[in-house]
């Protein structure tokens, strides 16, 4: 199979992303999630400040956030693995019908866990209110987070630039403004293509397993388990290093919210990471 990035692979990822968002229970309400998780550790005033601003501004340490994140990752991994195993049982001719649903479910849980991790580590609501449509800003942000999970360094660079800016300005609308800048679109498109390469390989791996009934369940569930948790941990580890997750950053911050920090993506170069960076992650260069 060629590893050259193609427009088709980018389109495949975008289709899967939209299919995943049509599944029930994918969107996580930021306020409700933070209130539920943080109330296990903190009084109401701390919890409400975390919701109004973010957990770091409420002086919640990355150690506590790490405990919550670990629980969220384990939960979503178990759910994704279980669903994937069930989808792997049919085998034979039903394989073609079950693969798309399996991948959509996988990415559905990817979107669920990335929302939880983003909200824990200082990001605002990803989805635009109650609007069911997938606008450009939301699609671009999801692609960047998923790009981090797949080990695409350009996604890390873009997320870091946005995080630095919002950690200084604390503007809820800043992310959406940054994600609709003209310079972000070619970067997001290339990241989507890189994800598409990896996604295609995963579909093939699951498909081979599903040809054999019962054994297919083990293969399908095993592939999901072996990929989902490390990807989630990679995102957690990265988000925890950004200023949006740093209590010390907010303690030391004396910048006026009138100071405008423009988000410039023009210096981000996206190489052919479908073969370089993504292949490297398959060899386990992230923490378990």
Image (spheres, rainbow, N blue to C red):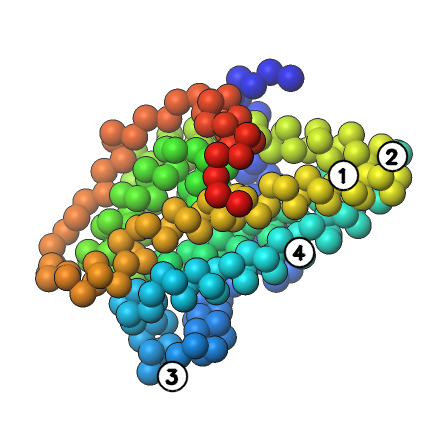
Q: Secondary structure at mark 4?
A: helix
> Which label was assigned to residue 219?
1
Tag 2: Cα neighbours inside 10 Å, few (<14), some, or many (≥20)? some
On the question of residue 52 being in view, the answer is no
Q: Earlier in the sequence, mark 1 or mark 4?
A: 4
Cα–Cα gap, marks 2 and 1: 10 Å
Q: Is residue 136 above or below residue 266?
A: below
Tell me the quarter of the picture where residue 31 sits.
bottom left
Is there CB contact under 8 Å for labels 2 and 1? yes
Tag 1: Cα neighbours inside 10 Å, few (<14), some, or many (≥20)? many
Tag 3: Cα neighbours inside 10 Å, few (<14), some, or many (≥20)? few
- The residue lying toward the viewer, choosing from 151 and 268, is 151
Q: Secondary structure at mark 2?
A: loop
Q: Is residue 283 above or below residue 220?
A: above
Cα–Cα gap, marks 2 and 3: 52 Å
Residue at the far bottom: name it: 44
Query: Going 33% across and 39% down the picture, which residue do you hit?
Result: 158
Cα–Cα gap, marks 4 and 3: 30 Å
Relative to residue 84, is residue 132 drawn left or right?
A: left
Q: Is residue 191 above or below residue 123?
A: above
Which residue in the structure is indicated by mark 4?
78
Is there CB contact under 8 Å for labels 4 and 2? no
> Which label was assigned to residue 44?
3
Q: Secondary structure at mark 1?
A: helix
Q: Position of residue 166 (x, y in %)?
A: 25, 54
Q: Earlier in the sequence, mark 2 or mark 3?
A: 3
Query: Going 84% across and 44% down the picture, which residue do you hit?
Result: 89
Relative to residue 269, is residue 229 drawn left or right?
A: right
Which residue in the structure is indicated by mark 2?
212
Q: Earlier in the sequence, mark 3 or mark 1?
A: 3
């Amino acid at each position: 199979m060629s590893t050259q990035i193609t427009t088709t692979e980018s389109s495949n990822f975008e289709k899967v992303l939209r299919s995943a968002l049509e599944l029930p229970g994918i969107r996580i309400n930021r306020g409700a999630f933070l209130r539920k998780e943080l109330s296990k550790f903190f009084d109401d005033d701390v919890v409400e400040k975390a919701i109004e601003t973010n957990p770091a501004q409420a002086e919640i340490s990355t150690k506590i956030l790490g405990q919550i994140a670990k629980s969220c990752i384990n939960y979503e991994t178990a759910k994704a693995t279980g669903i994937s195993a069930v989808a792997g049982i049919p085998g034979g001719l039903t394989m073609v019908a079950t693969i798309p649903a399996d991948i959509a479910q996988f990415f559905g849980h990817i979107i669920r866990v990335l929302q939880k991790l983003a909200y824990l580590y200082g990001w605002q609501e990803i989805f635009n209110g109650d609007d069911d449509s997938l606008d450009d800003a939301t699609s671009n942000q999801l692609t960047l987070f998923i790009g981090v999970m797949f080990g695409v360094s350009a996604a890390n660079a873009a997320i870091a630039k946005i995080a630095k800016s919002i950690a200084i300005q604390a503007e809820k609308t800043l992310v959406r403004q940054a994600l609709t800048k003209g310079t972000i679109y070619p970067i997001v498109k290339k990241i989507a293509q890189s994800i598409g390469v990896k996604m295609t390989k995963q579909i093939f791996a699951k498909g081979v397993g599903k040809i054999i009934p019962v054994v297919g369940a083990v293969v399908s569930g095993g592939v999901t388990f072996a990929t989902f948790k490390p990807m989630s941990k990679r995102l957690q580890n990265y988000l925890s290093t950004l200023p949006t997750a740093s209590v010390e950053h907010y303690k030391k911050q004396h910048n006026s919210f009138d100071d405008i920090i423009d988000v410039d993506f023009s210096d981000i170069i996206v190489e052919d990471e479908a073969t370089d960076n993504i292949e490297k992650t398959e060899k386990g260069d992230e923490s378990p």
